[in-house]
Amino acid sequence: MKGKFIVLEGPDRCGKSTQAKMLVNHLIALGKEVVLTREPGGTPTAEKIRQIVLEPGLDIRPMAELFLYEASRAQHTQEKILPALNEGKIVICERYTMSTCAYQGYGRGIDLNVINTLNQIAALETKPDLTLVFLMSDKYFTERGEYLFSDRLEQENVAFRQKMRSGYLEMIERTPNAYLIDADKNISEIQARVIELLKENHITD
Ligand SMILES: Nc1ncnc2c1ncn2[C@@H]1O[C@H](COP(=O)(O)OP(=O)(O)O)[C@@H](O)[C@H]1O
Ligand SMILES: [Mg+2]
């Protein structure tokens, strides 16, 4: 049987990693086989690309940045995501194609049609069965992290984050099986909502 592909999306510090780990534990307790992974990265080659795109202060032009993300995705999808799905596993991935539209498209202004085409190619037509988009009020951005250790992308400014936020909202509207998660809520409330959405989408019973 084919597996299920769950993607967690949303800006930095909105709780994706926290909820992803909790979801893995929940699914393992239900006896499911689960793979937790992330983008950019997820395989040795893709993690090397991740190091480049996240290096503070490195000069990366928007189009080069886009292709780095897509290179990471192509490797990750072929090497790890598709084989796991073909083995019937549940794959939980932090960030996927929607992040590229949000950052490189809505954020940096690269044509969304170009990005969607590259996304499809790199994802080998793989589409999430469920996309959970975590969005929180901007005030929590500083509360939930230390600026001191921010990587290159976390140093983007408030206006950039606002552009991405409206981009994510638009994408939720036109993406099948995509849901907004109110990331202002506390960790256990969010977890309960995530578990509910898995049931509603027939990923768990
Ligand atoms: N619902 C929440 N309420 C308050 N703090 C949270 C919540 N979810 C996560 N955090 C905290 O916020 C920080 C960022 O969370 P994290 O899961 O790493 O976000 P992301 O993976 O989206 O960048 C962590 O310190 C985490 O413990
Ligand atoms: Mg994270």
Image: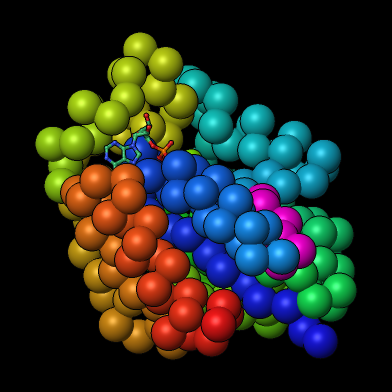
User: Left of 139 or right of it: where is 1?
Assistant: right
User: Residue 6 in the image: x percent, y percent?
Assistant: 57, 68
Quadrant in the picture for the N terminus: bottom right
- Specify the quadrant of the image occupied by residue 169: bottom left
- Specify the quadrant of the image occupied by residue 197: bottom left
User: Residue 61 in the image: x percent, y percent?
Assistant: 51, 41
Which portion, as a residue range, is magenta? 32-37
Can see residue 93?
A: no
Quadrant in the picture for the C terminus: bottom right
Question: Residue 133 versus residue 45: which sits nearer the camera?
Answer: 133
Main SS, magenta residues? strand
Total labels: the figure holds 0
Asked whether 46 falls inside the magenta stretch, the response is: no
Question: Residue 44 versus residue 37: which sits nearer the camera?
Answer: 37
Question: Residue 120 versus residue 24: which sits nearer the camera?
Answer: 24
**Residue 68 higher or lower than 203, as above or below:** above
- Specify the quadrant of the image occupied by residue 109: bottom left
User: Residue 56 in the image: x percent, y percent?
Assistant: 49, 22
- Kindly give the residue lying farthest to the top in the view shown: 148
**Residue 16 higher or lower than 172, as above or below:** above
User: Left of 85 or right of it: where is 180?
Assistant: left
User: Left of 2 or right of it: where is 128?
Assistant: left
Can see residue 170?
A: yes
The residue sitting at 72% across, 57% down in the picture is 35
